[in-house]
Amino acid sequence: MADLTAYLAATVFLAFAANRLMANRGAGADPAQGSLGRSALCMGVAMLLDAPATQAALDRLTPVERPVMLLTQELMTAGLSFLVLAALPLRSPAAPRRATRLQVALAVAVQVASPLLFLLSDSTVEGDVLVAGVGRSPQLAAYNGLFMCYGCWCLLLLGRELVRHLRRTGPGLLRTGLLLMTSAVVTGAAWTLWSLDDIAAILGDGRQKAGEDVVSTSLGVVTATLAAGGATITLWGGRLAAALNRPRARRRHRALEPLWSALHAELPEIALAPVAPSWRAESLQFAQFVLYRRVIEIRDGLMALRPYLHPEVPAWVAETAGPSPHAALVEAAAIAAALENRRAGLRYDGPPDPDQASHAVPGTVAAEVAWLLQVTDAFTRSSVVADIRGRVRAVHAGRRAG
């Protein structure tokens, strides 16, 4: 299982690295994206080397456990350093040279101190366990602690910049990408802090597992997936949104069918011209266009019903549903009564009662659709609307009988 998750994490990291590095070549390259690509490359190679199957294969060729372990940690540390270099351009498009120099100096210091601590620990590999030399457990614990603290520091710097951008970014693909990247920072921090179990084991008996365990590699998979998804969302997010929104638009179109059918049966002229055959029926644009047409047709129908609005409907609804009925319920009842009045040929002079005039929905087409869905639901399911419809029919029946 550890092999599977390690190789899966390596694959995601390396694929992400290839994508970012290929996309950020030449003039106009984004330094933040380039640094992310280099970070993913280091992480991917490190996960590849750290897989138990890779270590076993290398060991069959030559006993290189300690050098491979040291190289793996150095690659992971370099990957974390590149994350900070990705964070600096996020803080300012032209990152101050002094900040960059300080970060590079810190990275070099950690890269040098880490192998020194490892060598000072005089560690040996026994099977799949790394054993510190006699009296050298503190050095090996410091080796792991340095990696953990430096990793958390790098992730904190990147996370701070991501959150700062997230707070001032409106809804959309960019915000979703920032959310995914921020989530990757959180899981990355958990992955880094998982070194605490190694530190505890070393301080306890001077021994730690030589490779990554399943929990660690699983956190690596999640981190790699979130980071890759967040950084590349502009490539696939639009297609995914279209794939999800197309059936949603069709469902909403069907959900408006009862209200539209009731209006169209009485007012067939509200139907717009047929859609041109050149439109692709499977496209998101087609689904949204058809939904928008349905909204227009319903609104045209409601406009045509204005002379037939019954003045007593709001009071009737309040009698049945309470003193403050939902506006969608009032509008649905007004539509039901107006349709009955139109069939009976009963018009009302003067301007319509503002309490039952068609509800104005400011904003987007989506807001308009959401409102009409509420009206449609009340129109088809509410017992209050059914009672109003029956009441108006009774009034007309009495008029005809009289």
Image: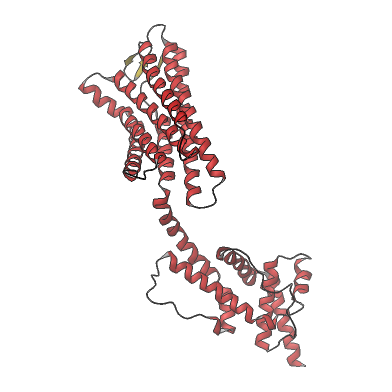
Q: Residue 256 at what x, y percent from top left?
A: 55, 70
Given residues 320 and 78, the one toward you in this image is 78
The image quadrant where one finds the N terminus is top left
Task: Examine the rendered structure and indicate whether residue 335 appears above or below residue 222.
Answer: below
100 left or right of 6? Answer: right
In percent of width and height, residue 368 lies at: 59, 66
Q: Residue furthest left?
A: 61
Q: Position of residue 49 (x, y in %)?
A: 30, 28
Q: Nearer the viewer, residue 45 or 135?
A: 45
Q: Would residue 157 appear left or right of 80 to someone viewing this image? A: right
Q: Position of residue 96 (x, y in %)?
A: 47, 33
Outermost residue to the top: 135
Is 379 located above or below residue 98 in the figure?
below
Rendered residue at 68%/70% (across/down): 383
Q: Is residue 208 visible?
A: no
Looking at the image, residue 166 lies above or below residue 107: below
Quarter of the view holding residue 277: bottom left
Q: Is residue 301 visible?
A: yes
Give the total of numbered labels: 0
Q: Quadrant of the C terminus?
A: bottom right
Q: How is the protein colored in the picture?
A: secondary structure
Quadrant hosting residue 3: top left
Q: Is residue 190 left or right of residue 23?
A: right
Q: Which residue is located at x 75 percent, y 67 percent? A: 321
